[in-house]
Image: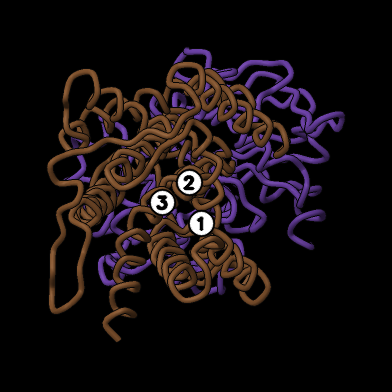
Chain colours: A brown, B purple
Amino acid sequence: MTTFLQVFMTGILTGGVYALVGIGLSLIFGVMRIVNFAHGEFVALGMYTSLLLFQSMGIDPYLALPLIIVGGILLGALVERVFIAPIIAAPEHVSILMTVGVGLVISNLLLFGFGAHPQSIFTWYSTKTVRVGGVTFSGPLSVSFLITLAVILGLYWVLTRTEIGRAMRATAQNRDAAELQGINTAVARMLAFGIGVALAAVSGTLLLPVLYVIPTIGGVFTLKAFVVTVLGGMGNVLGAIGGGLILGVTESLGAAYISSGYRDAFGLIAFLAVLLLRPAGLFGKSRV
Amino acid sequence: MLLVESINVAYGDLQVLWDVSLSVREGELVALIGANGAGKTTTLRAITGLLRPRSGRILFDGKDLTGLSPHRIVEMGIAHVPEGRQLFPLMTVEEHLLLGSFLPRARARRTQNLERVLSIFPVLRERFHQVAETLSGGEQQMLAIARALMSDPKVLLLDEPSLGLAPLIVKEVFGIIEQIHKEGVTILLVEQNVQQALTIADRAFVMENGRVVLEGSGSELLAHPEVKKAYLGM
């Protein structure tokens, strides 16, 4: 029983960070109606940026978060303006090719800059653990989970309580009507992409203390984000939280009880099952 | 105040508006009537920039609007209540009214306008925290008009406000339109409900197959033999 709880809770903690990756993808899909196939590469970019800051200046990943958030929003907005905005009205496959292309450029730049070998950071808290009633939690993973919660609450506040957040949701729900309220929907899209990228980069930073990184790790996260988003319902930002937790727990349980070599496969099996049984996702259609 | 000068609009290769011209003077209630597919909605969509004319000009207070994005046109003081209401299905009444006053100019007068709009549409006060998709058709139409009024418009474009509503609600909506007009808002009203529209209109334009074919005062057109025959079934 303790083993089960242990494995389950590890799944929840990891799933929280997956949720954050998925929420970014979901927000972008909701507002822009495109799937960002470069999403995982932005996770990788967050990881390597934090790695660089840690190695060259000794900045702790958690302390680098404000910088990662601001940098992520700016980079995302720039990428949207330069690469996505010109093709936003084009047929779907154009945006797929474009985002895949952006992802390839990022992963190859990382390969060029950091080399192909796996890297990780070691901090004073890397091996710290927290024990609660027989269950042991990884220290950094727990901290990452709590920060994830704070970021999700912050995003929820922005989306529901601020003018610009409402404008983004309005753009997602009815673009023409949003324009007719005086909302510059091109700016709303740019901002949505910026926030989505920032969320991906933040997830990367939060995972850095518990993972080895390689330049091609992005592909794994694009896939995970996609699974999370489909589990929760495309464009359904709150559903992505459920999707992330389910993915984390499924992987964790499968790895512990069946085979850790097929860790990623269990998430995909859950994904296929949901697609077959509930194609609109576990929590229904687009809700931003 | 609002001047449409011989615009031509096409969807791809299919031209739907041919040299459409019309004018709305300050303080007027102008009706644009005609059968389904005559081009009334297209005309409104061209005015607020949701469609771009191939040729022709649209002037508002002497400024050329042609080719501007909708959000820029709305900023100049034109509000558009689109066909089919176009609400944000998952947002509450309150959020719609806040979005209606998104622009800085309207945001400054948000509190006054909110009071004004809720006094015109008391039912929205009762539904204030309800999500739009749970409202009845009549309530949704009222919300769409209320949202547009929150922007403090100089001109209000109304596209088929009576569409799909029960006769009693239609009467209520027309009463509200008259009231808003009396309070000084200039209105361009697109309607298939020709009788009621002409009764409250100062002037009206009749469209057929993408062209303006008749124009006159509301009462003139009500008495016009062709209008009587084609739209009033007399």
The residue sitting at 46% across, 41% down in the picture is A178
Task: Locate residue B91, reporting x and y percent.
Answer: 38, 59
Instruction: Report in which chain the residue with disc 1 lies.
Output: A
What residue did someone put label 2 on?
A25
Q: What amino acid is found at the position of numbered circle 3 in the picture?
A: Ile
Cβ atoms under marks 1 and 2 closer than 8 Å? yes
**For residue A112, above or below residue B230:** above
The residue at 68%/45% (across/down) is: B221
Label 3 packing within 10 angstroms: few (<14), some (14-19), many (20+): many
| Dot 3: element | helix
Res. B103 mark: none
Q: Quadrant of residue B38?
A: top right
Output the chain of dot 2: A
Q: Amino acid at mark 1?
A: Thr
- Percent across and percent down for residue B132 are 42, 64
Give the SS element for disc 1: helix
Q: Which residue is mark 3?
A: A23
| Residue B154 visible (yes or no) | no
Measured in 3D between alpha carbons, the distance from the residue under mark 3 to the one under mark 2, in whole angstroms, is 5 Å
Of A45 and A176, nearer the camera is A45
Task: Indicate which disc residue A229 carries.
Answer: 1
